[in-house]
């Protein structure tokens, strides 16, 4: 009798654990967006609700009320390096993004307490890392799914765009890395292995001391005479310094080596630079 009962229990237990699991698509799927930026990266984790025939702003998402900026838990942003958000410094770390939409202006809050989640009734202003206002813009095309994206990305600037329905807000991000890079260049240039090309390129791109950039470009070309991309950088620096004759000479030398290497891209770049320099001499 005991063996029979035990057998029945085992069958029942096995049957219970073997029930099929029904999987369905998440109504507001999770997405993680990561962007290399400055000297680190920025990561956003959020859930993406859809319109589904509803009116979003002013109805589904009320005006003048704190919104978790997505669905489910609050949207989180992780900043890998100190930067400026909408012109204000923010330390590296992870923050929740809350917003308060309105027709003419949105409040945007970066929040330090990550445990609050969607419980906006217990939102406390003293836990804000920053609070600023952004004017929304109207998009021509209707966007069904709430979307966060990094746009207009450069080495030190980009926009964090929040988009849904026909509304977009663009939050400007600035990687305030210039002082760090300049200090690093100064330190490295005191060592035996000096990255002349990288340093000259950074100074050129960021409009710093062109005399110093040219000095480093000359040394880079001397150490790497066959590196035609370095000669091309030297030509760009010379053109920026209004030395059109020197720019033409450097670009011509760069193009000859690029032709030998069958590098059509640098042939085209040097051709354009020579044309610019010749126009500047007229």
Image: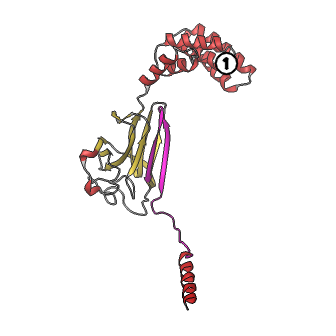
Secondary structure of the residue carrying tag 1 is: loop
Asked if residue 74 is positioned above or below residue 210 in the image, the reply reads below
Residue 253 picture location, percent across and down = 68, 13
Asked if residue 280 is positioned above or below residue 79 in the image, the reply reads above
Quarter in which the C terminus is drawn: top right
Q: Which residues are magenta?
A: 18-46
Q: Nearer the viewer, residue 56 or 214?
A: 214
Residue 8 picture location, percent across and down = 56, 86
Asked if residue 38 is positioned above or below residue 224 in the image, the reply reads below
Q: Is residue 282 visible?
A: no
| Residue found farthest to the front | 2
Which residue appears at 57% of the width and 87% of the height?
A: 3
Residue 150 picture location, percent across and down = 46, 42
Q: Nearer the viewer, residue 266 or 182?
A: 182
Which residue appears at 44% of the width and 48% of the height?
A: 140
Residue 95 shown in magenta: no
Q: Is residue 261 visible?
A: yes
| Mark 1 crowd level (few <14, some 14–19, many ≥20, 10 Å Cα) | some
Residue 120 picture location, percent across and down = 29, 55
* Image quarter of residue 231: top right
In the image: residue 203, left or right of residue 271 = left
In the rendered image, which residue does mark 1 sit on? 227
């Amino acid at each position: 009798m005991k063996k029979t009962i035990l057998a029945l229990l085992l069958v029942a237990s096995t049957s219970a654990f073997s029930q099929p699991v029904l999987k369905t698509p998440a109504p507001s799927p999770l997405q993680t967006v990561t962007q290399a930026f400055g000297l680190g990266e920025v990561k956003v984790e959020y859930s993406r609700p859809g319109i589904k025939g509803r009116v979003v702003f002013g109805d589904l998402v009320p005006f003048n009320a704190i919104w978790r900026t997505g669905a489910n838990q609050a949207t989180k942003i992780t900043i890998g390096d100190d930067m400026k958000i909408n012109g204000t410094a923010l330390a590296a770390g992870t923050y929740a993004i809350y917003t308060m939409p309105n027709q003419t202006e949105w409040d945007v809050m970066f929040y330090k307490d990550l445990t609050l989640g969607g419980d906006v009734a217990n939102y406390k202003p003293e836990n804000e890392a920053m609070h600023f206002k952004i004017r929304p813009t109207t998009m021509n095309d209707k966007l069904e799914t709430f979307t966060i994206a990094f746009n207009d990305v450069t080495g030190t600037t980009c926009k964090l765009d929040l988009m849904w329905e026909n509304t977009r807000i663009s939050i400007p991000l600035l990687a305030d890395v210039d002082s760090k890079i300049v200090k690093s260049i100064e330190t490295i240039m005191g060592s035996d292995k000096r990255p002349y090309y990288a340093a000259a390129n950074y100074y050129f791109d960021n409009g710093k001391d062109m005399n110093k950039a040219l000095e480093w470009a000359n040394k880079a070309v001397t150490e790497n005479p066959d590196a035609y991309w370095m000669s091309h950088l030297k030509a760009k620096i010379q053109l920026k310094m209004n030395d059109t004759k020197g720019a033409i000479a450097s670009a011509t030398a760069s193009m000859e080596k690029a032709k030998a290497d069958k590098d059509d891209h640098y042939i085209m770049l040097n051709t354009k630079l020579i044309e610019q320099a010749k126009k500047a001499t007229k």
